[in-house]
Amino acid sequence: MEYLVSNEMTMMDKLQILSDAAKYDVACTSSGVDRKGNGRDMGNCLAGGICHSFSADGRCISLLKILFTNECIYDCKYCLNRRSNDIPRATFTPEEVCELTMQFYRRNYIEGLFLSSGIIQNPNYTMELIYRTIYLLRNRYRFNGYVHVKAIPGADPRLIQLTGYLADRMSVNLELPTAEGLKNLAPNKHRKTILKPMRQIQNGITENKNEIMLYRNAPRFVAGGQSTQMIIGATPENDFQIINVAENLYDKFSLKRVFYSAFVRVNEDKDLPALPGGPPLLREHRLYQADWLLRFYGFKAKELLSEDRPFFNVMLDPKEDWAVRHLEQFPVEINRAPYEMILRVPGIGVKSAMRIVNARRSASLDFNALKKIGVVLKRALYFITCNGRMMYHTKLEEDYIVRNLTADAKVKRQLGEDGMTYRQLSLFDDTTLAAQPTIVDSGKVLMGQM
């Protein structure tokens, strides 16, 4: 096939345009693949992950993260690269992407490639360009490093399958949390069209695992699993709806990661929300923390939030927010409680919970021992006892604990009714200026530390 690409720009001009155009595609993840150098091809792919960098807006990105093209036939209202925008456009050739990847790799700038794309001509044409690029990179250029590519919804399943045998990870962007939001802001895209390749990749991974069990040298299909991304704040879904969507994606599609991208208003459109406080980055951060609780801490979405209380308190991390709303389950006796309950205590992570379980087999643990283990006592002390005693005399009341947990925040924020909006307090706010001592401060006084 012939490729319609621009020959008027240099490769570096294209790189400048298409690397900047890719900054809203989230890829802050390790590769999840362990493939050593084979002595023949260029590069390797260790489980430690691809190289990371931080963009100007604070996002963690892979060092070479580009769009194949920022041309697009769609007109999504939230997208900078939408058809109706008058912006510089560029399109790589497959050979140019390969040359860039190899040059950056030889200079030790990157460990892998993240390749996404706008939709040029149609989904099939775009997916074939991506497949051709990765095929050349693997076979002509002998690149053996990490490759993450986007599967294009609506493309021929055969092209997605062929690409899956060349890529380490694939992703299909969900775009927005609900089908209704997608209909309002991206009328050219449909939820069923997005979920179809997601299901295909899931089935392909499962079948490939069974094939590898029978034939050890069978080619790998998307060995690093698949992920997705959704924009947060462009549509009016609450946190409860969003984490329910994420939980369903993990359960039904076996995703490795769900990425959350705070909405950035790059277009002027009456259907897009105003952002007087800027992109909802703090909300994005809390959703990532809640996502971690779903994947590693045994929580369910319906435990973290409810229809009656659908937003997280952004002043607390989601585990603290859950704990202060379920004080009937606390305090937890560290020397007797099961691992699953210890894991739910704020300030105790997976590693420290395992250390507690192992250490208490040989000795009774006290607060000094917990500190050495790695427990963040500043948060945990309200929710635990050691041998029936709390670290300090505290009240098991939600308001009291919340005040103490948020007292040491470097920047005081004032919440709106939805628990999401916040601003820095000024000297002219009508509020109490004298900071009340926290329970930690009181304890330090008693112990002669202050």
Image: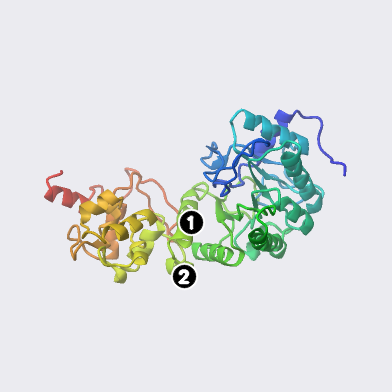
Q: Which mark is residue 109?
A: none
Residue 69 seen from this side: no
Binning the other alpha carbons within 10 Å of mark 1 as few (below 14), some (14 to 19) or many (20 upward) gives many
Q: Residues within 10 Å of mark 2 (few under 14, many from 20)?
A: some
For marks 1 and 2, give the CA distance: 14 Å
Q: Please determine whether, in this image, residue 450 is positioned above or below residue 101.
A: below
**What is the count of numbered marks?**
2
Residue wearing tag 1: 287
Q: If the image is split into quadrants, where does the C terminus sit?
A: top left
Secondary structure at numbered mark 1: helix
Question: Vertically, is 396 above or below 368?
Answer: below
**What is the x, y in percent for residue 183?**
68, 62
Q: Quadrant of residue 349?
A: bottom left
Residue drawn at x 63%, y 36% as measured from the top left:
43
Q: Amino acid at mark 2?
A: Lys
Seen in the picture, residue 90 relative to 447 is either above or below; the reply is: above
The first of marks 1 and 2 along the sequence is: 1
Name the residue nearer the viewer: 155 or 420: 155
Q: Nearer the viewer, residue 385 or 24?
A: 385
Circle 1: residue type = Leu
Q: Quadrant of residue 42?
A: top right
Q: Position of residue 89 (x, y in %)?
A: 75, 38
Q: Is residue 256 left or right of residue 396?
A: right
Q: Residue at x 66, y 40 (%)?
A: 144
Image coordinates of residue 110 in percent, x first then y, are 60, 35
Judge by depth and name the residue closer to the eye, 1 or 36: 36
Could you say which disc has been placed on residue 302 in the image? 2
